[in-house]
Amino acid sequence: GGTGGRVAADTGLVPVDISFDDGAHAGIASSKYVQDFLLRSPEAYPLTVVLKELLAQRGLNEPFSGGLSSYSLVLLVITVLQQAGIGPPAEGKTARNQQRLRSRRKSPSEAATNAVTAHLHQLRPNGVALGPDHSAAADFADVAACTASGYEDDELSIGLLLTRFLEFCGRGFNPQAQGISVARGTGVPFDLTPEQQMHLQAMGTPTPLIEDPLDVSKNVARSCFGINQVQW
């Protein structure tokens, strides 16, 4: 596969990841997959940005330190949208119900998204990451209320989807017994086989199984050994 490294950035600069494409690296294909998804699902972008900021506040957004990668996060967002009936369906599946739901949903406003990100920066003054014992419950409630306030109703608002995401990933999803598969198109976690459970615990610290929709034999969350902190 390709090699990648985190480029250390001085204060005020934007950190970047660099990957070298050697023919077997799937980074370009996965980036295109995410871009296409964001174009089809406008609510996914502000939802993902808010979640990335919440993870960054707690130092849980870097896979090399046990956090959740951006690609894994996007796949979890897709899973929640599939549960709401507006995520990409399984291959060959009809999208009649999706079209019905899409006609009812609200397009996220830039003002609402900016209000949420500004609120999140207030929760993390001076850009300092919050400690691991900082309770996120009040922050999550504030963010959900802030996102919902930019919409006429909360039927399929970003605030409601954010609440659903936190409920599913924090309480509903059991990474020690279940896996995530966007390719199946249902949004329902599948039960892990005993062999899969043993493999995920082989390194001593359990990691979640999130299938890559471009190659379901790959686990894009294999380095997320901090999944317990992510769910907390």
Image (spheres, rainbow, N blue to C red):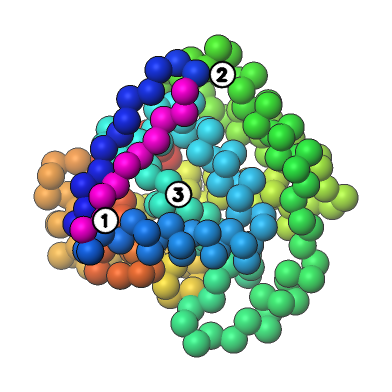
Kind of residue at badge 1 = Asp
Label 2: which residue? 124
| Quarter occupied by the N terminus | bottom left
> Is 80 above or below relative to 96?
above
Label 3: which residue? 73
> Is 88 above or below relative to 199?
below
**Percent coordinates x, y for residue 189 in the rendering:** 41, 64
Q: Is residue 75 visible?
A: no
Q: Is residue 46 visible?
A: yes
Q: CA distance from mark 3 to mark 2?
A: 21 Å
* Element carrying mark 1: loop
* Element carrying mark 3: helix
Say whether residue 38 is left or right of residue 98.
left
For marks 3 and 1 on the same chain, the one whose residue lies earlier in the sequence: 1
* Element carrying mark 2: loop
Q: CA distance from mark 3 to mark 1?
A: 22 Å
Q: Residue at x 23, y 64 (%)?
A: 23
Residue 15 highlighted magenta (yes or no): yes
Verify CB contact (< 8 Å) between mark 3 and mark 1: no
Label 1: which residue? 21
Q: Quadrant of residue 25?
A: bottom left
Say whether residue 96 is left or right of residue 197.
right
**Which segment did they paint magenta?**
13-22
**Percent coordinates x, y for residue 110 in the rendering:** 75, 43
Kind of residue at badge 2 = Arg
Kind of residue at badge 3 = Leu
> Is 60 above or below relative to 209?
above
